[in-house]
Structure formats: structure tokens, C-alpha cells
Amino acid sequence: MLLGTLSSQFGPLSGLLETRQLAVICSICLALILAWKCCRVETNPSKHGRLPHLALLTDEEIYDTPIQSMSRALRTHGSVVGFKRNGNIDYLVAKEHAQRVLTDESSFSFEGGLAGMLGITWIRHLHGGSFFRDIDGTMRAFSTRRMNHIVPEIWPLFEKAAESLVTNAGAGAVDIQPHLQQAMAEGTIKIFLSEKYNRADFKERMIKIATDIAYLTGLDPNRSFLSRKFPLLWHAVKVIHIALVRLPLNIGPSLAWELWVDISRDVQDYDPEDSTIFSYLSRRSTVKGDKLSFSAKLWNMVLVLTVMFGATHQTIVSMIWVTFFLAQHPDSQESIRKEASSITEAGGAFKLEGLHSAVLTDSFIREALRTKGDSVNAVRQSVQDVELDGFTIPKGSLVFPFTYQCYRDSDLMENANEFIGNRWVGTGKSATTTGLEYPAFGLGRWACPGRFLAINELKCWILALVARSRLELDGGKYEVMDAFNITACAPDGKLLVSRVEA
């Protein structure tokens, strides 16, 4: 009726209005379908055994005070409890079940859990469901085994970033995130891409693309009213706004074409010494004697963009957390400053061996990541009905080990609730060593393959920063932006920085 009235009153203009209205309606319908496909279907309780108790946690308790509310739920209802989140029933398990949930692949799926958590379950239906395996393999084979060559390339970048931060600090408080974004963007280019991409416009686009993907997958502060009260509608809005508008604009046709040309080159077109991700993926995707198929090129584009995001966003979040902890511990700053000086004097600067000798820095990083306040930082999906402690977790459910208990388990370490910067020196456990008391990078087969690169980048940043400055938190505090998702969301705060004379 509305369209008919417009047609009679406005003539030719109505055609344009009808087209626009139909486009809007179609976009909303498409987004709702995608959002619905990304949601998990709740299983029928009548088909299962004894289901865990459902803890009646409010959105505010889950997102603002998860440690207190989840601790209370487990004390009240036992070691396995259900809770409603984003319109679905998820399950929380106590520390005694964490090892099994994180390592028993016959019962719990890493790929299903992470896809469900990020709202990208559809990606498991593409390319034979190999997305997470391809990313895992790429990070293990491409970056980890090249660390001797990578460290000399990235160390100067963090020296430059630290010097820029100190120089521009002046008398006011500074935000370290822009400095880290620039350093990490340039580092990602040097490690994965090629020097021709090392230019200002590309780095800015990389930063925007990483921000878009973080927002699209929910790795951003979960504070909006819509996201908590109307998750389906919020997911639809994000799909339209990010996937269909912002992300394509930020990639841009010229950058997309530039990446596509490099991705489309066949194996024989690369120099044997080429060490870019393009040549690695081309060799990995090509059957001997064949050329890259169109679908393989498309898939490699997805992997390149994902690696660009993964290599920047998560490491920056960890860097901010560790830097803020460092600002709260001036005694550790002094110890690490002496360590940085000794590494330089011994000729270890800009070398992997120098980073290996930075044991105080490594211990501080591990301890900061252990105590920063994660409630849950790992997730799995049950691949069948699974019995835990007399309760049945239905197939297809997201399961969160309450990792806060693992980090603070007095049976696994003394004074578990205290921050002790040098706790791990001489223990044989580095910041990359996984374990039940330190699931910062996961556990088992799917422990984060990028952790070796991330920790070395963290060491470069901390050593470069402390060697030339003293740090304090502006106002003596920072704000936690998303208590439920501390792992992926950086705290908000600024630093007071003063130069240390050599």
C-alpha cells in the first residue's frame, strides 16, 4: 500500500524508492538468515540424561562480574552448570574437568567451539571444513620455523615504536595502542608479505581490516544494549554493516587487486628463495605440475586476510595488558632494564639468542598473562552427548572451562593469587609453555601455534620500552572493557612515560 501511494504521487521517483526499499528488505532478510545459520540449535532436553543445573546468571553478571558470578554458580550447583548467553544454553565446567575438555578431541571439538564462539559456524562448511587446520598449519610451518630470520627483522621495529612513544610522551598521558598498531602492521608485512607492501596506506588499511574483523567476530568490548538483549538482531546488524559495507571499503579495490595478483601467481613464477606467505600458500595448494585453481586462489585470499588479522589484533591486546602490568610494578621495570642492558652488552640485541636469555622478561610476561583476570579463555563444542560428574552435556553445546580456577589453583603452585614477576625463572616453564596452570594459549593439540612469534614480539617491545623509559599508569588504574572476554579485549588506560638516560 505504501509503495502504491508513492507511485501515484511521485511518478518516476517511486521506482527508485521501491528499489531502495526492496534492497533494504532483502539485505535485512539475508543478514537474518546468516545470523540464524550462525546460531546453534538448542537440543531437546528430553533426549538426554540428567542435564546440568541451569544457573540463572544475568547478562550483567556474565559480562561485568563473570569471576564472582561463575564461582558462585559452581559452588552452588556443582562442577558442571549451564547458563544462558546470547539466546543459547552454554556450559561451564570447573577446573577438575578442564584437562579433559581441552584435550579429549573425541568428545570436544576446538574447531566447533571457536567457530560457535566467534559466530562463524558457516566457515566450517567451506573448503572441506579445513579453515582452522589451514591457519594452524600455516602459522606452524611458516612463522615458527623461521624465527631465527624473523627476530632480527622485527626487533628494530619495536625499538622505533618505543622511541616514538617516549619522544612524543612529553608531560601528558599517552595511548600506546596507535604505536603498537603501527609496529605490528609493519612487522606483519615483513614477516608474511613483501617489502612493496611496507607503505603508509597499506599499514592503515591493515589496522582498519583487523578492527573490522575483530568487531565482526565479537572480539570487541561487548557493551552495547542490543548485543546483550537482542543478540540475533545485533548479529544481523553487524553482518550488514561490517561484512557488506565497512570491510569491502577498507580493503578497497586497489589493495584487493594487488593481493589477488600475488596470490594468483603459480609456483614456477616464484624465486626459490621467496619467503612470503604467497609463495608458501601457492606451493601448499598446488598439485605438482598443475596450476592454482580459482577456488584455491579465493581460499588463499581468505587465509592471507585471516593471518593479517591474527598476527596483529591478539598480540596487540596482550602487549597492552603486559605493559599496564609493568607500569604497576616499578621494581620489575628496574630488573628488566638491567636485563636489557646485559643483553645489549653481550651482543644479543636483535638476535633470537638475546631474547632467549631474557628470562626475567619472559617470566614477567607469563605471570602477567596468568593473573590478568581471565574467567574463561578457551572453548570447545561437544561432538556427542558427554557425561561429566553425573551430568550430560548435550551434543553441539559450547563448553567453557572456568580457567580462572586453573590460573589460581594452589595445588598447582604456591601463592597462586599473588603476582610474582620472577615466579617462573629457573622453573623450565617459559611464557610459551602450556599447562593446566597456564592455559593462556590453550592446551593440547590446538594450543595456539602463533604463541612463539607473539611472545618474541612481546619481549622485543618490553625490552625496548623499559630500556629507555619509566612507566606509570595515568591515575594509577585502567578499565577492563569486557570482563568475560579479557583475552581478546585490551584494557582502556593511558601511560605516563619518562625517559631514562643511558
Image: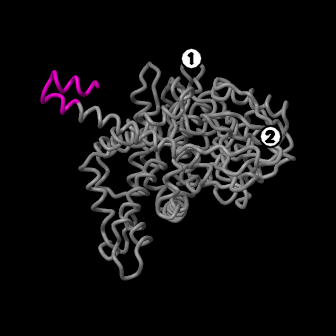
Q: Which residue is mark 2?
A: 52
Residue 272: % across, % down:
36, 75
Which residue appears at 36% of the width and 68% of the height? 274
Q: Tell me which amino acid carries mark 2.
A: Pro
Q: Is residue 8 above or below residue 48?
A: above
The quadrant of the image that shows the N terminus is top left
Q: Is residue 13 left or right of residue 444?
A: left
Q: Is residue 174 above or below residue 408?
A: above
Marks 1 and 2, the one that precedes in the sequence: 2
Relative to the observer, which residue lies in front, 148 or 320? Answer: 320
Q: Which residue is mark 1?
A: 475
Give the quadrant of residue 383.
bottom right
Magenta-drawn stretch contains 16: yes
Residue 66: % across, % down:
69, 29
Q: Main secondary structure of the magenta part?
A: helix
Which residue appears at 25% of the width and 49% of the height? 253
Q: Which residues are magenta?
A: 1-17
Q: CA distance from mark 1 to mark 2?
A: 44 Å
**In terms of secondary structure, where does tag 1 sit?**
helix
